[in-house]
Amino acid sequence: MDLQVLIEQIETGEQEIVLTALQSFNKQMSHCFTFSREGKTDREEVKQQKHLGELVMGFLNRELQPPCLQACLETIRILSRDKHGVDPFISCAAMSTLAHYAGIATIYPATLLKGRPVECQVDNEGRDEEETAEGSSTVKESCLASENPDQEVIVEALKSICNILLHNETGQVVAAEIHLIKGLAKRLKQSHSPTWSHEVLFFDLRLTFLLTALRVDVRAQLARELHGIRLLGNQLDAVLGLCWPDRLETTRAGFEGMPPEQLPPLSRQQTELAMEILKILFNITFDTNRRNVDEEEAAEYRHLGAILRHCLMSQSDGEERTEEFHSHTVNLLGNLPLPCLDVLLMPKVQQGSIEYMGVNMDAVNMLLDFMEKRLERGHKLKETLLPSLNLLTESARIHRETRKFLRSKVLPPLRDVTNKPEVGNTLRNKIVRLMTHIDTDVKDCAAEFLFILCKERVSRFIKYTGYGNAAGLLAARGLLRGGKDPGIYSGDEDSETEEYREAKSRINPITGVVEEDQPNPMEGMTEEQKEYEAMKLLNMFDKLSRTNVIQPMQLDMDGNMREMTTKDLHKLTHNPVFQPEEPADSDTEDEA
């Protein structure tokens, strides 16, 4: 449709003409989501679009019939898809008008106050003409209805604001300044009412997510001033339809006593709303596990953790959607304060539950299965695998029962000593392979997980991974000479199998397996020949070092790596090479 013709029709001011024109435009552009703006013609089109946006925004400030109001908001939604065409919608007045029609306004433009009682306009007194003309006057919420009865209008306005925030930083600033988050929080408190449609609830949550993702100040405001953890936790509770048999134990209302695996799957709408809530909660708890929380906050997080455990044990309509739902759940669990993760182990052991040391391990086992699925997929491991792997690592670090259960699954008593630790299809083999991954974060996280399961004991870590795979973590911690990191761990049962004891003396600690005997390359050499070959090798290293091809390293007495200087190499060429005695390691293989 010719934009100039459309503009001329809107300029007539006749609602019927405007309605027909906008409906035609909206129908034609309903599936247009991409805009390329390069040539002179396109730049002219952008100007026309902006002018169209200004006219439609001005039209919204009139008393309109519902069909015309709906058409205007649909047009704004379509125009706001173009990042070059949002300028007419990012002023305080325009954003306040859209917020009014979305039912979440706390500040109203003066143009919407015409014809209202005098008490609604008192805030204009004392303001200069420019400020009043820009429509920045404010009124109490009681002066204007905060909810529009037409929910289709509300949804269109919410969609438009979402588009504006996605495309324009100024729009984000204005949204924060007019406190949209307060209006959203107020309606979220009322969302338990059947009055609101699924679409209104969904786009309320989507807009809240965008505000908290894009604005740090809004994130903090929702978390603290508006008590976002409790507000959204209650919302998630209502969406899932939970009841509480015990203080930190949940089940689905109407299905009390039914094992989690037998519960019916969540509906598509329930899952959509739950995932939006989980994303918002992730934003406002992003730094929680890095700070101390008081007793009241800890209680809130434990309550939320119990709901998240239910999410983890629930299924949705389809495997793909279930995995996405669980992914958001795992991401949020990783933000909770570590001591609060004990809620994962609190439910009573029921028939069909996985029990270990008298504790219900259903949630931990679900996390392990989820992590293994992501590991097998092998796609974008940093984004997809690390949240679950980090969560399991930290849980194992602070909860003895979790660590022992995970060790029984990941590092069972060693029997196969003929294959390298990284060769095979067991979960141990897969994680050991990650220890040499090209991505440093993935490599470090995998090594840390296994190190925790080995109670941070070097000898046991090398036993299960091989010295070559373990060297990176050990070097970073100054443990290449052996020993163990400080930590309080309980004693476990004997971890050595008969097969391992028999082969222990023949295992190569570098590779972690029994290898075939190799011929001695120095067999038949005299002592002079051996010394000559040793000197030749050292001279080669010296040459490579002086030309900066390599940087020789050596262990200091603390077990840390340091650079070898030319002086160090000179000493080695003129002094016997000896291996200092390794400090005694008090670890025994009879402890786990």
Image (tube, rainbow, N blue to C red):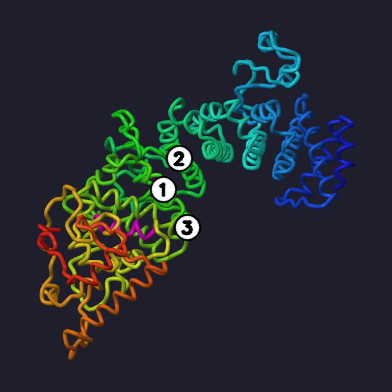
Q: Quadrant of the C terminus?
A: bottom left
Left or right: where does residue 31 sit relative to residue 300?
A: right
Which quadrant of the view contains residue 404? bottom left
Which quadrant of the view contains residue 225? top left
**Disc 1 packing (10 Å; few <14; some 14–19; many ≥20):** many
The CA span between labels 1 and 3 is 20 Å
Query: Tag 3's secondary structure?
Result: loop
- Expressed as whole percent of the image width and height from the top left, the position of residue 183 reads 56, 27
Q: Label 1: which residue?
A: 331
Main SS type for the magenta part? helix
Q: Which mark is residue 318?
A: 3
Q: Label 2: which residue?
A: 239
Residue 568 counted in the magenta span: no
Which quadrant of the view contains residue 250? top left
Image vertical order of residue 92 relative to residue 78, above or below = above
The earlier-in-sequence mark between 1 and 3 is: 3
- Expressed as whole percent of the image width and height from the top left, the position of residue 492 reads 12, 56
Left or right: where does residue 481 sit relative to residue 97?
A: left
Residue 446 counted in the magenta span: yes
- Name which residue lies at 43% across and 52% down: 327
- Name which residue lies at 12% across and 75% down: 505
> Which residue type does callout 2 highlight?
Val
- Expressed as whole percent of the image width and height from the top left, the position of residue 431 reads 32, 64
Magenta stretch in the rendered image: 442-452
Q: Which is nearer the eye, 86 or 43?
A: 43
The CA span between labels 2 and 3 is 18 Å
Q: Which is nearer the eye, 333 or 587?
A: 587
